[in-house]
Amino acid sequence: MSRFLTTNRNIELLEPYEGKLSCTVLRGEGGSNALDLPDVTSLGVTAQYFTLNNNLSIEPRVALKWKINPKHSLALAYGLHSRREKLDYYFVEKVVNGKNQSNRYLDFSRAHHVGMTYDWNINQNLHLKIEPYFQYLFRIPVEKNSSFSVINHEEFYLDRILTNAGQGRNYGIDITLEQYMKNGFYYMITGSLFKSKYRGGDNVWRNTRLDKNYLLNLLAGKEWMVGKLKQNVLSLNGRLFFQGGERYTPVNEERSQAEHDIVFDETKAYSKRFSPSINGDVSVSFRINKKRVSHEFSLKILNVGMRTGMHFYQYNERTLEIEEKEGTGLIPNISYKIYF
């Protein structure tokens, strides 16, 4: 998906104001129907100004929330969001057709976000949230007459001349079932179904790199109070996730063999996808609580399944073959913290 959307949808459109407002009922003269205004309404405007090229962005935001009853609520939010690109993008300069061109005057990338949230407090400790959403991205930096878009860019370095002519759209639904801490145990299950498309400088709509289509996260943990006074905490936590394969651009094998380097076929950008991946993380910690100070020892192990979901290609000069590689690696992390 685009940078506006990560593996999970991390953009908060607008946090509703949780104040107490009275509910007003509007009735038409002589009519029998009533229109209930939202219990919570939030309006706002955000502004951004970029001094390098004097770009200004005014972004309206609105959020409405209806409290149906103590257990059920419905919310609707809209926001216009803008984003500045990485600073080094603006200092790229090249000679194109005998003329000096640069990215100095790139505009903000912009996106309209519309989201709805249904909340159900099943009981005191169990909560269900359903969130459908739609995002329309515009003024996205792309390269003219190319499938390139910053939406898919993942390299540290960029050397292309860009123009704000790209578009994108993301839509999907997130479902979260969460049990709050009860008797030292908690869990959260999150599932996402989504679709992500973009239009590059060649005006062709394609899948984005992160159009994985589905994602499932399982998170759980348990805490035990230990010690003579039950003041110390031993905790065990784990996370398991399953996700669709990332999209990728196929290799142009003929050109790669001729140049002894990896050359991608940009006319077929992100038309292929890697296999789905499953992985997990675990952690264990022990916290010793004293009157004036606390000590915490922890061990975290990331990528327990040794699968990162990251793939890449390389040209083997010895065998003169193109090889597909997958990033792997179990990452242990041992830490000690002291709290005063």
Image (cartoon, grey):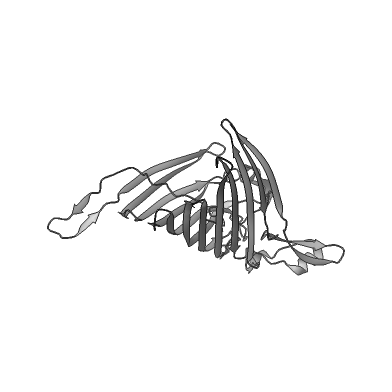
**Which quadrant is home to the C terminus?**
top right
Above or below: residue 264 compared with residue 226: below
Front position in the image: 55 or 237: 237
**Can residue 285 be seen by looking at this rendering?**
yes
Front position in the image: 161 or 153: 153
Residue positioned most to the front:
228
Relative to residue 217, is residue 64 drawn left or right? left
Q: What is the x, y in percent for residue 12?
A: 47, 49
Above or below: residue 316 compared with residue 16: below
Relative to residue 15, is residue 321 drawn left or right? right
Q: What is the x, y in percent for residue 331?
A: 71, 52
**Can residue 9 be seen by looking at this rendering?**
no
Residue 120 picture quarter: bottom left
Residue positioned most to the right:
318
The residue sitting at 42% across, 50% down in the picture is: 79
Residue 265 picture quarter: bottom right
Q: What is the x, y in percent for residue 80?
A: 44, 49
Q: What is the x, y in percent for residue 194?
A: 51, 63
